[in-house]
């Protein structure tokens, strides 16, 4: 079923497993962290880390003129742990003014005082170009993220590639990755004009032998070490969430006193070796340079 593209609420599918947003390595310690780490090790043992080829869902472009429930699952009714001060709510996922809007607002849900939003693809993607055009609101203690992830709940090792705007300072975006559950290559890079002032393009190119991050078409980080490259197909996520515990990373949480939004105009995946799908695509310039 396609949703009305104007300010629409979305129904949540059934049978999906609990997910997580990107959080610092400090959260993976203690009893819960030990169990999670054990699951990562077990999954890594069951699934060799250096796969020769990756299976991938097909290339796509989504401009959110409608909400494709066959592609996207909406998180609803849980949090990703004690570090998160909000509960995922499907009510905060909307189509508005030609963009997908994810919200964060003060609203008591279960044991939390705030509600937040996340979507994820139902399929997994491999080598290729991942890109999103998005704009964030602002607020200390909030995280607006575009990332890919797979993990033990999917019976896979934990691999992840991130763009995270810590909205205490929207002049920058953090790029990083997790390889078999270990954080790698975290780096803060400038977003010219600010992530909150207009729509910016964030993209990464994942190949077997390298991983490159781009902001507005400019290369900002590159990894070629084989031990620091993901090896498992991943789902694509967008999320906006808050924390009153991760002050060293996200800043002291301050109730914004208003609804904060992350807006996504477009997201695309172009499989490696396939032609670019729209003129502004990062894949177009990558294909020309290669």
Image (cartoon, rainbow, N blue to C red):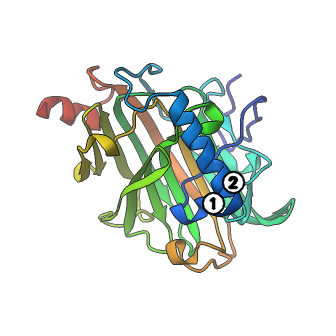
Residue occupying image coordinates x 59% and y 80%: 252
Residue extending furthest toward the left:
289
Residue occupying image coordinates x 33% and y 46%: 228
Q: Secondary structure at mark 2?
A: loop
Q: Please give the residue where the numbered disc 2 appears in the rendered image.
A: 80
Q: Quadrant of the C terminus?
A: top left
In front: 157, or 38? Answer: 38
* Residue 251 locus on image (x, y percent): 54, 77
**Is residue 101 visible in this depiction of the protein?**
no
**Residue 61 relative to residue 237: left or right:** left
Q: Secondary structure at mark 1?
A: strand
In front: 20, or 142? Answer: 20
Graded by Cα atoms within 10 Å as few (under 14), some (14 to 19) or many (20 or more), the crowding at tag 1 reads: many
Q: Badges 2 and 1: C-beta atoms under 8 Å apart?
A: yes
In front: 53, or 2? Answer: 53
Q: Please give the residue where the numbered disc 1 appears in the rendered image.
A: 241
**Is residue 121 visible in this depiction of the protein?**
yes
* Residue 191 locus on image (x, y percent): 33, 63
Residue extending furthest toward the right:
110
**Residue 150 relative to residue 218: left or right:** right
Q: Quick check: 25 above or below 68? A: below
| Disc on the earlier residue, 2 or 1 | 2
* Residue 248 locus on image (x, y percent): 52, 77
Q: Quick check: 5 above or below 31? A: above
Q: What is the number of the mark on residue 126?
A: none
Q: Quick check: 215 above or below 193? A: above
**Residue 178 relative to residue 43: left or right:** left
Residue occupying image coordinates x 75% and y 30%: 13
């Amino acid at each position: 079923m396609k949703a009305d593209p104007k300010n629409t609420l979305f129904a949540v599918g059934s049978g999906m497993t609990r997910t997580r947003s990107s959080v610092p390595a400090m959260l993976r310690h203690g009893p819960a962290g030990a169990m999670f780490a054990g699951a990562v090790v077990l999954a890594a043992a069951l699934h060799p880390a250096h796969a020769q080829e990756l299976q991938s869902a097909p290339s796509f472009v989504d401009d959110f003129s409608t909400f494709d429930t066959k592609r996207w699952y909406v998180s609803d009714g849980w949090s990703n742990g004690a570090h998160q001060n909000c509960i995922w709510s499907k009510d905060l996922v909307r189509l508005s003014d030609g963009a997908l809007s994810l919200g964060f607002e003060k609203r008591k849900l279960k044991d939390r005082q705030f509600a937040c939003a996340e979507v994820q693809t139902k399929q997994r993607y491999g080598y290729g170009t991942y890109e999103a055009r998005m704009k964030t609101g602002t607020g200390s203690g909030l995280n607006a993220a575009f990332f890919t992830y797979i993990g033990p709940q999917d019976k896979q090792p934990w691999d992840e590639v991130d763009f995270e705007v810590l909205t205490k300072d929207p002049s920058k975006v953090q790029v990083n990755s997790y390889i078999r559950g270990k954080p790698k290559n975290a780096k803060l890079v400038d977003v010219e004009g600010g992530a909150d002032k207009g729509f910016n393009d964030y993209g990464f190119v994942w190949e077997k032998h390298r991983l490159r991050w781009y902001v507005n078409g400019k290369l900002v980080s590159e990894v070629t070490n084989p031990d620091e490259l993901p090896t498992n197909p991943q789902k694509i996520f967008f999320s906006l969430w808050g924390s009153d515990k991760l002050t060293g990373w996200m800043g002291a949480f301050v109730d914004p006193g208003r609804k904060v939004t992350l807006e996504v105009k477009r997201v695309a995946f172009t499989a490696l070796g396939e032609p670019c799908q729209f003129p502004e695509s990062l894949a177009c310039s990558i294909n020309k340079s290669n």
